[in-house]
Amino acid sequence: MQNKLVSMQKVILDTNFLLYILRNKVDLFSELNRILDQNYKVCILDKSLDELRGKKLGKLAVEFAKKYFKIIKTKKGKVDDLLLKQDAIIATMDKELKEKLKKRKKQIIIIRQKKYLKFD
């Protein structure tokens, strides 16, 4: 067997994407395994966790994120702007953010039929 370096792809969830998967009980990890043919690490920005405070499902979402995702520490800025700077696949349902990501030729994951993940 050869030892080869396996690169770990980051998948960063947008705030609303996280709320959506919780609300609709999307099986995030099996769906990511289905569409990604590489090792990955699910991440969320610390600013996204800040956005969740006070939202319906916010407390649950923060607890879920802290348990299952790597939290990326960021400097000041809006979540969308910080996501645009990341070298990662971005999971979002935000139309405006998707357009900006496409212009920068970034990979995007969206949700189809309320439960399936798909590259956009």
Image (cartoon, rainbow, N blue to C red):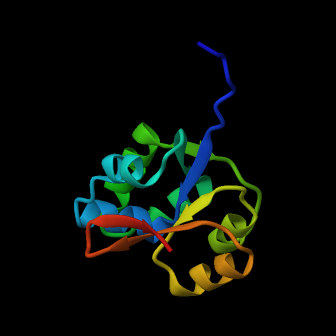
Residue 42: % across, % down: 51, 47
Residue 90 placement: quadrant: bottom right
Q: Work out which residue is located at the far left of the displayed protein and give it.
A: 25
The residue drawn where x is 71% and y is 65% is 82
Q: Seen in the image, is 111 located left or right of residue 5?
A: left
The residue drawn where x is 67% and y is 68% is 106
Is 94 placed above or below 75 here?
A: below
Q: Work out which residue is located at the far front of the displayed protein and give it.
A: 1
Number of dots carrying numbers: 0
Residue 98 placement: quadrant: bottom right
Of 87 and 37, nearer the camera is 37
Q: Seen in the image, is 21 located left or right of residue 62?
A: left
Residue 99: % across, % down: 62, 85
Quarter of the figure with the N terminus: top right
Of 65 and 56, nearer the camera is 65
Residue 72: % across, % down: 64, 47
Q: Seen in the image, is 13 located left or right of residue 111?
A: right
Residue 78 placement: quadrant: bottom right
The residue drawn where x is 55% and y is 53% is 11
Is 99 placed above or below 12 here?
A: below
Residue 62: % across, % down: 42, 51
Of 60 and 117, nearer the camera is 117
Q: Work out which residue is located at the far top of the displayed protein and give it.
A: 1
